[in-house]
Structure formats: C-alpha cells, structure tokens
Amino acid sequence: MYHVVVSAEVSMRIAGVVLAGGRSSRMGQDKAFLDFGGKPLIDHMMELLRDVGLKDVYVSGDIEGYPSIPDTQSFNGPACAIADVMAHLSQYDGVLFVPVDMPLLSAGILKTLTQSKAGGYFEQWPLPAFITQPCMVENAYSVQKLLDEQEVTPLAIPEHHKAEMQNFNTPDDWQKVTQNEC
C-alpha cells in the first residue's frame, strides 16, 4: 500500500476511487468509456489517481475488467456509492474520490486535498473529495450532506486550479470540456 505523507509526523494509507456507477442518462452513453486523449475516460481518471501517488485505485460501480467496488444499491447516487466504498475500504486511513466526469483535474489539485489530515474538498464543489476514516454515514442522500456530517474540511481552491473544476453531463457539456483538453 502506498503511504502519503501529510506532514512531517503523519503518514496515511490512502486509496483512490473513480466514481463511475451512474447511468449517464443525460449523456446518452456511458461516460466512463468516452475517448479522452486516446483512451477511455475511466482509464484517464485511474491514471490521474496513480499520478497523485496512490498505488491502490478502484472504481465505484460494477465495471467489468476494472477493480470495482459494486454499489449495494445500484444507481442510488454518488453519496450512497461513497458510503459503500468507505465501508468496503475501512482498512485505509482515507479515500480520495474523483468523479469520472471531471477529466481536467490535475494531480496537483488532488494532492492539495490529501494534505488535509481531516479530509478535504473545495468550497462550492463537493467532488473531488478526500474522506478519512472512520466514516459513519446515516443517510447518504447528497455528497455535501455526507461531507458535512463527516466534518470534512472545505478548502479554498487555488485560483490557478479553478479551470480544472469542470464536469459534464450532456454531449454539449462534453464538447466544451474536450475543447479544453490538455
């Protein structure tokens, strides 16, 4: 397992998870397998988590051919998927979550989240998020509520990273995001 140094005194075991269990109904096709930079988007996002320095990377959802953590209730939203993953990966000190539909994220912005030993997410954007254990979820009906209940720290997003905070749900959104592809 990979250990991420949070401070000079603290080392944490952190896993990475790509949230990819949605229906992609507004997109009209599975977002995880759209081509991004010559490879499926899900592969891009898993590589991004590895670029952060995480050795153990999983996919939330049941995606054949990938190290998946199936949802206990399919298509019940990302908050329920996060709760399932946190229970499944209780051996880790924390889990860094990225949605499959934010391909412009960089390793730098994600490393910022893992530096907060109490977890972190960026103000106005509940995802991506770094959530630490223990994670006890009562009613996971929204990611923001889950983050608030777990007392995950909202962080100010560095100005030079704001352009990375784009997701997509429709073909028009996808076209706009891919126009910014690096």
Image (spheres, rainbow, N blue to C red):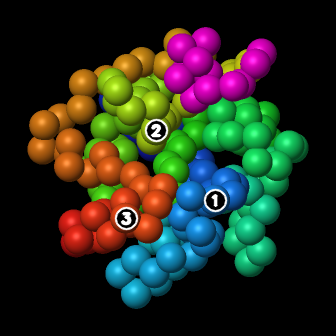
Q: Is residue 103 magenta?
A: no
Name the element at disc 3.
helix
> For the residue carrying disc 1, how many other residues have a C-alpha within 10 Å: few (<14), some (14-19), or many (20+)?
few
- Residue 88 at x, y percent in the picture: 79, 41
First to last magenta residue range = 138-149
Q: Identity of the amino acid at label 1?
A: Ser
Q: Nearer the viewer, residue 161 or 53?
A: 161
Residue 1 can be seen, yes or no: no
Name the element at disc 2.
strand
Disc 3 vs disc 1: Cβ atoms closer than 8 Å?
no
Quarter-of-image position of residue 78: top right
Quarter-of-image position of residue 42: bottom right
Q: Identity of the amino acid at label 3?
A: Asp
Question: What residue is shown at x 69% (from left), y 40% (from top)?
Answer: 77
Distance between the alpha carbons at the discs numbered 2 and 3: 21 Å
Query: Which label's residue is closer to the chain start, 2 or 3?
Result: 2
